Image (cartoon, grey):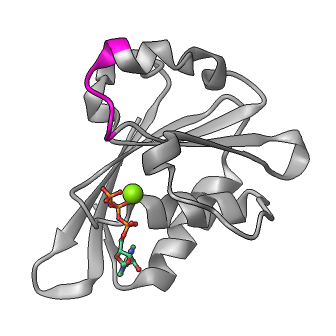
Amino acid sequence: MITIKNEEDMVKLAQGLAEKCQAGDCFALHGDLGAGKSFLARAMMRALGVTDEALPSPTFAIIQEYDAANGLKVAHMDWYRLEDSFDVANLGVDEFFTAPWVTLIEWSERAPELLPQHTVHIYIELDDTDINARFVRIEK
Ligand SMILES: Nc1ncnc2c1ncn2[C@@H]1O[C@H](COP(=O)(O)OP(=O)(O)OP(=O)(O)O)[C@@H](O)[C@H]1O
Ligand SMILES: [Mg+2]
């Protein structure tokens, strides 16, 4: 369990994850509404060299695609508005689970069976006693 004191700590965690990131990697970001899934995803995208000025929420578009450094591409997804794995499969998500893509997925709970075997799961929990603190668990 990693204790995060504030947003700066979360950015550092994102930088550490991005450093080890390779084409084809998939990260499933878990946590309640407002836990910080999008915050972590955006910090990882910046650390991976995404220079787009705006990093819009994927809640409505479901998939946002970006060019990153070193030939990597990032797909930031939010499956919240999808019903089930039928909807998710229809998006053709499989193509993103290989090079040159790195995928960052919020609300993968909608269709957990569609995640690739090599998915890294990141669980973010709020700290009831501190609005800036989080607890993070990483499982491969
Ligand atoms: N240590 C922290 N790490 C991440 N976010 C933090 C932290 N402290 C405060 N925040 C704030 O918490 C909010 C997290 O919102 P965010 O949109 O990332 O949540 P989310 O998990 O993506 O929610 P949703 O399920 O609605 O997509 C942001 O406003 C962010 O500024
Ligand atoms: Mg979000």
Q: From the image, which quarter does the N terminus lie in?
A: bottom left
Pinpoint residue 6: horizontal percent, then vertical percent: 39, 85
The residue nearer to you, when weighing 75 against 18, is 75
Asked if residue 82 lies in the magenta stretch, the reply is: yes
Tell me the quarter of the picture where residue 130 sits.
Answer: bottom left
Q: Is residue 128 left or right of residue 108?
A: left
The residue nearer to you, when weighing 109 against 1, is 109
Q: Is residue 85 left or right of residue 95?
A: left
Task: Say which residue appears at 25% left-offset and 54% top-offset.
Answer: 31
Q: Is residue 112 above or below residue 40?
A: above
The residue nearer to you, when weighing 53 against 24, is 53
Asked if residue 90 lies in the magenta stretch, the reply is: no
Pinpoint residue 61: horizontal percent, then vertical percent: 52, 42
Q: From the image, which quarter does the C terminus lie in?
A: top left
Task: Say which residue appears at 66% left-offset and 58% top-offset.
Answer: 45
Outermost residue on the left side: it is 128
* Magenta span: 80-86
Q: Is residue 122 above or below residue 130?
A: above
Pinpoint residue 24: horizontal percent, then vertical percent: 67, 28
Task: Say which residue appears at 59% left-offset and 67% top-offset.
Answer: 43
Task: Say which residue appears at 77% left-offset and 63% top-offset.
Answer: 52
Tell me the quarter of the picture where residue 93 sits.
Answer: top right
Q: Is residue 88 left or right of residue 17?
A: left
Q: Main secondary structure of the magenta part?
A: loop
Outermost residue on the right side: it is 70
